[in-house]
Image (cartoon, grey):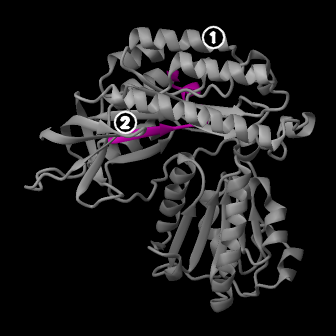
Amino acid sequence: MSTSASKSSAIRDPHAHDGGFNAMPEGEFEGKKVYIETYGCQMNLADSELMGGILAEDGFDSADAFEEADVILINTCAVRESAEERVFGRLSQLLQYKHDDPDLVLGVTGCMAENLREKIVDQAPYVDLVVGPDAYRRLPELVKQCMRENADPVIDVKLDQDEVYEGFSPKRKDGVGGWVSIQRGCDKFCTFCIVPFTRGRERAVPPSDVMRQCRNLAERDYKKVTLLGQTVNSYYHDETDTSFARLLDQIADIDGIERIRFTSPYPVDFTPELIDTIARRDEVCNYVHLPVQSASNDVLERMRRGYTIEEYEDLVERMRAKIPDIALSTDIIVGFPGETEEDFRETVDLMERIRFDFAYMFKYSEREKTYAEREMEDDIPDEVKGERLTQIIELQEEISREVCESRIGTVEEVLVEGESKRDPDDLSGRTDDFKNTVFPKPDDDSVEAGDFVDIEVHDCTSHTLLGEVVSS
């Protein structure tokens, strides 16, 4: 398989089943290994598990390292420019392995593949395969085509408004918690966001298939499930009249599933029924990630977020009235086109009023094909964006530390996830409201991943509770 730049001059139509497309004998993938490297959000991680499951059905094993693989797939995100730069850098690093092994299949999947289809082949002509989020069920056939001698690059990025991957089983490692995608695509069309263009319009996975996956997790002794969707609480399945709140109730009834999380909800679609369900069901965690993006109504209108900051704060008040101990996190963008110093100050003031437990904070960067990129001038200097970002990061660090300090002296129930990343003599896990908690392993090794333990908190950092086991 050539790695020369001339490959980009011809792109094979993956839907054209010409002679020889299925020439690879049945079972040819047995013994072949695939390595999937993931960039981006939890939905990308879930999609990587989905791709692994689809390829496993055709005989592929998972490689522990890319050096062992016959196929390397880079699963990508297109939300941030930095992620795209990292992917192109990674592809450049992998070129040497293509030179050493011309039969190696190198593919790019995910949102970046959908958005930058031609650019990928032009900039990285040694890439064999470019696959969008709606084409994963065809991966075995596409890989087979790439393995044919002298095959041209294969691009399959056609959006499919019916694709929800019903019936497929992700390939998961054993663990404590697992992701289940309940929704694909998005209908909101925020002016800064590219997701509707890379993942298509919103559609719901049938409740029966969501329940199948959640039961499979319970059968494998997973204790926690995280439901995923771009605007996850917008979920509604017409044929069964199933709202997101009703779906939560059904999952909470599954024996063995003791914690349910979801991300990311959209403020406009956060219904009273959903608030009541979170308050009523112990299995649903007392933690909500609620993106605000900005506290300026002028900026929110230009972003097309669909709510005012007064409506957002009213939602927070109603949630805290029903669920007093709920933890809240958020997303914030600074430097959106036209953001004045007054607009920015409104965001700072909101952070001080609401006191989020933590926040994901970014400075605005244009994404190709979005309304903001086409119609708005990116008029805030990068230096100003950087200063504003630094300011809110420092503020949030202070608030997060104070929130964690308020837990010192309390006893928290923690679901143990495994060894601490920093010290193998420590274990780590999460509280019901998503606080990372680290504590020494008991001397008798009586605690392991999947256990619920009571931890007495005696110290903290801005993002982690520190304590000791008081019972197990």
Answer with the quarter of the image where residue 391 lies. Answer: top right
Locate residue 96, reporting x and y percent.
66, 85
Which residue, as the protein is rendered here, is positioned at the far left? 444
Q: In this view, does 446 lie to the left or right of 375?
A: left
Question: Which residue matches tag 1?
Answer: 311
Q: Does the magenta stretch include residue 242?
A: yes
Measuring 30% from the left and 59% from the top, which residue is drawn there? 423
Measuring 45% from the left and 31% from the top, which residue is drawn there? 400
Q: Residue 435 carries which label?
A: 2
Element on which disc 2 rests: loop
Nearer the observer, 430 or 150:
430
Are the residues tagged 1 and 2 within 8 Å (C-beta)? Answer: no
The correct choice, above or below, for 287 with respect to 101 in the image is above
Mark 1 / mark 2, whichever is N-terminal: 1
Answer with the quarter of the image where residue 174 lies. Answer: bottom left
Q: Does the magenta stretch include residue 27?
A: no
Query: Magenta part of the protein: which range?
Result: 224-243
Which residue, as the protein is rendered here, is positioned at the far bottom? 100
Locate residue 127, reporting x and y percent.
73, 74
**Mark 1 or mark 2, whichever is nearer to me:** 2
> Is residue 90 visible to us here?
yes
